[in-house]
Image: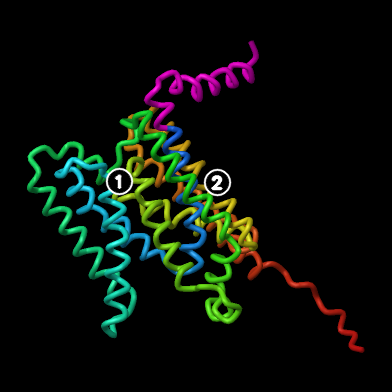
């Protein structure tokens, strides 16, 4: 057997061996689905300057998760309710005070996150809640997979069906309002989808890391492509690739799954930052230092 055949066989074993186990099948499917839909929404968050809003929602759901655990109801319900509550509080503070948006976001999400930590300290057994903080994708059940797939399908369907309207709001809110689009309603729908997407990624990445896949894929795509349609596809692909790389890395090297997924996304961002043909650092440096064509000296 040739060296190439040996390498090919080794690569196949590397990819297929983990999939012999049902828990790895569930983990990989959940990670790819949640990271891909987060990447899709990430494109809008980056364009609209909502990255901090994504962080706010991701951290604000913690008290909802803890309360849902205490009451014995689905954790996703508590997370979704508190995600919407965070958005409502941020909007209320912005309308009733003269504080800037980043200040109101900081006040709300730090306060709710601290409330979640305090509530966690009152729970006798915290093992399951620790998984909410840092993710536990390897403990995903088939029922969890179906739930994540359903939430992701709803989010992706709304984003794709209303893609043109959302994009117009992201690029030019004034023009969107002038042509009769319900800008306030569309903005509210995006915020609801943000809360829903955060719940979708909760099992995979946990409260602390979920914000990474809501920001990094969109930022990476922004550096690589010019059109928004391409940005949407690349952003979602970056999320999916990060999920696959992170899950396999966590299996073979016994690493944190959520942390590995985020580092895989970060690695793609660094490559885009350095090597992007149009916006990459190296291409910008080359354009500055490359010899310019000499003028012939003939003027007409």
Q: What percent of the width, then of the height, locates residue 262?
A: 40, 46
Q: Secondary structure at mark 1?
A: helix
Q: Residue furthest right?
A: 300
Q: Which residues are magenta?
A: 1-27
Q: Which labelled disc corresponds to residue 199?
A: none
Q: Position of residue 140 (x, y in %)?
A: 34, 32
Residue 25 included in the magenta stretch of the image: yes
User: Percent position (x, y) of residue 110?
Assistant: 22, 64
Of residues 230 and 192, the one nearer the viewer is: 192
Would residue 177 appear left or right of 38 to someone viewing this image?
Answer: right
In space, the residues marked 1 and 2 are separated at their CA atoms by: 25 Å
Between 87 and 113, the one lying in front of the other is 87
Q: Which residue is mark 1?
A: 76
The residue at 39%/59% (across/down) is 192
**Would you say 170 lies left or right of 18 here?**
right
Magenta stretch, main secondary structure, is helix
Mark in front: 1 vs 2: 1
Indicate the quadrant containing the C terminus: top left, top right, bottom left or bottom right.
bottom right
Q: Residue sitting at 15 percent across and 53 percent down?
A: 117
Q: Residue at x 50, y 62 (%)?
A: 44
In the rendered image, residue 221 lying in the magenta stretch gets the answer no
């Amino acid at each position: 057997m040739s060296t190439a055949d040996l390498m090919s066989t080794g690569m196949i074993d590397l990819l297929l061996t983990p999939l012999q186990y049902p828990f790895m099948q569930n983990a990989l499917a959940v990670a790819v689905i949640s990271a891909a839909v987060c990447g899709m929404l990430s494109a809008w968050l980056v364009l609209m300057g909502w990255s901090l809003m994504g962080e706010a929602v991701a951290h604000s759901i913690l008290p909802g998760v803890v309360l849902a655990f205490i009451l014995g109801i689905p954790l996703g319900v508590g997370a979704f309710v508190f995600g919407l509550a965070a958005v409502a509080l941020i909007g209320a503070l912005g309308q009733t005070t003269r504080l800037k948006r980043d200040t109101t976001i900081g006040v709300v999400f730090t306060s709710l996150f601290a409330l979640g930590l305090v509530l966690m300290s009152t729970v006798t057994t915290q093992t399951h809640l620790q998984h909410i903080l840092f993710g536990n994708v390897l403990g995903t059940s088939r029922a969890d997979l179906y739930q994540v797939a359903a939430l992701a399908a709803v989010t992706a369907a709304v984003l794709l069906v209303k893609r043109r309207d959302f994009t117009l709001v992201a690029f030019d809110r004034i023009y969107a309002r002038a042509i009769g689009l319900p800008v306030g309603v569309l903005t509210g729908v995006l915020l609801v989808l943000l809360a829903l997407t955060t719940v979708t990624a909760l099992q995979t990445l946990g409260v602390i890391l979920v914000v990474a896949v809501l920001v990094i894929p969109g930022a990476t795509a922004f550096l690589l492509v010019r059109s928004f349609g391409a940005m949407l596809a690349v952003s979602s692909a970056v999320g999916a690739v990060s999920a696959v790389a992170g899950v396999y890395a966590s299996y073979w090297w016994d690493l944190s799954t959520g942390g590995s997924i985020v580092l895989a996304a970060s690695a793609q961002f660094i490559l885009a930052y350095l090597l992007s043909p149009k916006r990459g650092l190296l291409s910008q440096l080359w354009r500055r230092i490359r010899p310019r064509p000499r003028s012939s000296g003939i003027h007409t």
